[in-house]
Amino acid sequence: MSIKDYVALKKEEMRKEVSELKIVPTLAIIQVNDDPASNAYVKGKLKDAENIGIKGILIKLDESISEEDLIKEINKINNDDSIHGLIVQMPLPKQINEEHIKLMVDPKKDVDGFHPLSSFNPCTPQGIVDYLKAENVDFADKNAVVIGRSNIVGKPMAKMLTNLNCNTTILHSKTSKKNLEMFLANADIIVIAIGKKWFLDKQTFKNDAIIVDVGINREDGKLYGDARPDLNVKLQTPVPGGVGLLTRLTLMKNLLQAYYQEIK
Ligand code: GUN
């Protein structure tokens, strides 16, 4: 099933489920940066919430806010029982340490999965695993290559694939061309999150490989993935209309799970 159809189906299931709940599941989004990418992401999340019947509350703060004042705002939401999930949209302005902020969100409400004690995995790798499972992908003893070592995608992705019994390798921007080509030629599952337009292109792939493209590269107002579209493999996720939709879906799933845990 395409990602678009899969996401539409799952959202419809959630919408039905939410319509039967007495207390409205509620997500708060704190936004500090006013850049176009953050605005677009936040708008997408609020739209998803509305479609499913989740109440979305946007708290837009001034870009000059101090770390201390931002933490006060986070604590207000941490202590508000009517709010089940909280995300702080990243990136944050330079006067604020993002790593401090990630630790201030109550782990029970941390639907982004950024806190080390959060009940949730970060949304992008979790969304990818859920989709691949729905597609009946085999993980055991498969060679997985994750390109990119970020804390929100590459590292948790590699951990999750390893827990699914993949033989996992993490590659990154400093990997040599020779090693890149060697690992790719033997890879069954490739997840690329390196932020370079069409980085995967002329290399050799197994023709039954799976390529999951996490890249979002903007050029002249258009979006490009980290892989050239239509490589000769069994399954390749599109950009746009691919992993971004899975990330957003997982955020809503996590919010519903946080809701059930909190009203219990
Ligand atoms: N900025 C880019 N992606 C994300 C995300 O998944 N969560 C948050 N909070 N900020 C982001």
Image: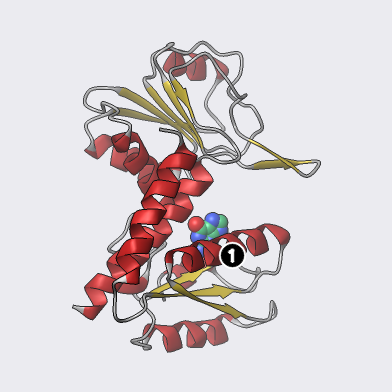
User: Total of numbered circles in the picture?
Assistant: 1
Can residue 212 be seen here? yes
Q: Position of residue 110 (x, y in %)?
A: 37, 68
User: How is the structure coloured here?
Assistant: secondary structure
Q: In the rendered view, would you say 98 is above or below 151?
A: below
- Dot 1 surroundings within 10 Å: few (below 14), some, or many (20 or more)? some
Q: In the rendered view, would you say 111 is above or below 142?
A: below
Q: Position of residue 248 (x, y in %)?
A: 47, 55
Q: Quadrant of the N terminus?
A: top left
Q: Residue, x 25% and y 77% (percent of image)? A: 262
Q: Secondary structure at mark 1?
A: helix
Q: Residue, x 52% and y 47% (percent of image)? A: 244
Q: Which residue is at the front of the view, 64 or 97? A: 64
Q: Quadrant of residue 141?
A: top left
For label 1, being within 8 Å of ligand 1 is answered no
Q: Residue furthest right?
A: 220
Q: Position of residue 166 (x, y in %)?
A: 27, 29
Q: Residue furthest left?
A: 264
Q: Which residue is at the front of the view, 141 or 103? A: 141
Q: In this rendering, would 231 be left or right of 254?
A: right
Q: Quadrant of residue 138?
A: top left
What's the amino acid at mark 1?
A: Val
Q: Residue, x 24% and y 71% (percent of image)? A: 260
Q: Position of residue 87 (x, y in %)?
A: 47, 69
Q: Quadrant of the C terminus?
A: bottom left
Q: In this rendering, would 202 be left or right of 244?
A: right
Mark 1 — residue? 42
Q: Quadrant of residue 20?
A: bottom left
Can residue 107 be seen here? no
Q: In this rendering, would 204 be left or right of 133?
A: right
Q: Residue, x 60% and y 24% (percent of image)? A: 229
Q: In the rendered view, would you say 4 is above or below 256?
A: above
